[in-house]
Image (spheres, grey):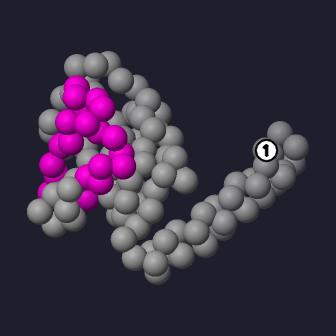
């Protein structure tokens, strides 16, 4: 997160209870900074659960960067948001469209059924 632009991480996250976890500053939309990439490689991680604010920008760009690098990516939709009501509303509408699209894919003819 970019603390000078967005402010500090809220205390409700409880980061003080986990002294080994430190917030990492970023000045780009994706969280896949060189520092984060190095930490993930050192720990041999292959899966990530994402949450955060500015889902339409930061969470999305981070997810795409992780997928590009071959990670398994899971987005905790109920742990994502945005700073503005309009962006939260657009996200909710888009989520409904995606869910319906995925539902339709399950019922579309498969190549072997054609």
* Depth check, front residue: 98 or 11: 11
In the rendered structure, which segment of residues is drawn in magenta?
Answer: 9-30
The quadrant holding residue 46 is top left
Instruction: Say if residue 73 shows up in the picture.
Output: yes
- Residue 111: where, in percent of width, then height? 79, 44
Q: Around disc 1, counting alpha carbons within 10 Å, would you say few (fewer than 14), some (14 to 19), or many (20 or more)?
A: few
Is 2 included in the stretch rendered in magenta?
no
* Depth check, front residue: 73 or 69: 73
The residue at 25%/36% (across/down) is 16
The residue at 55%/53% (across/down) is 78
| Residue at far right of view | 113
- Residue 60: where, in percent of width, then height? 40, 56
User: Which residue, given by chain and number where applicable, does mark 1 sit on?
Assistant: 111
The residue at 88%/43% (across/down) is 113
* Depth check, front residue: 31 or 77: 77
Q: Secondary structure at mark 1?
A: helix
């Amino acid at each position: 997160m970019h603390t000078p632009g967005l402010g500090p991480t809220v205390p409700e996250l409880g980061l003080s209870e986990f002294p080994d976890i430190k917030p990492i500053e970023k000045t780009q939309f994706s969280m896949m900074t060189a520092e984060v990439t190095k930490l993930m490689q050192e720990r041999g991680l292959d899966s990530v659960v994402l949450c955060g604010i500015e889902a339409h920008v930061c969470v999305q760009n981070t997810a795409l960067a992780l997928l590009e690098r071959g990670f398994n990516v899971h987005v905790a939709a109920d742990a994502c948001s945005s700073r503005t009501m309009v962006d939260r509303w657009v996200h909710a509408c888009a989520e409904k469209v995606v869910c319906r699209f995925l539902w339709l894919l399950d019922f579309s003819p498969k190549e072997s059924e054609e």
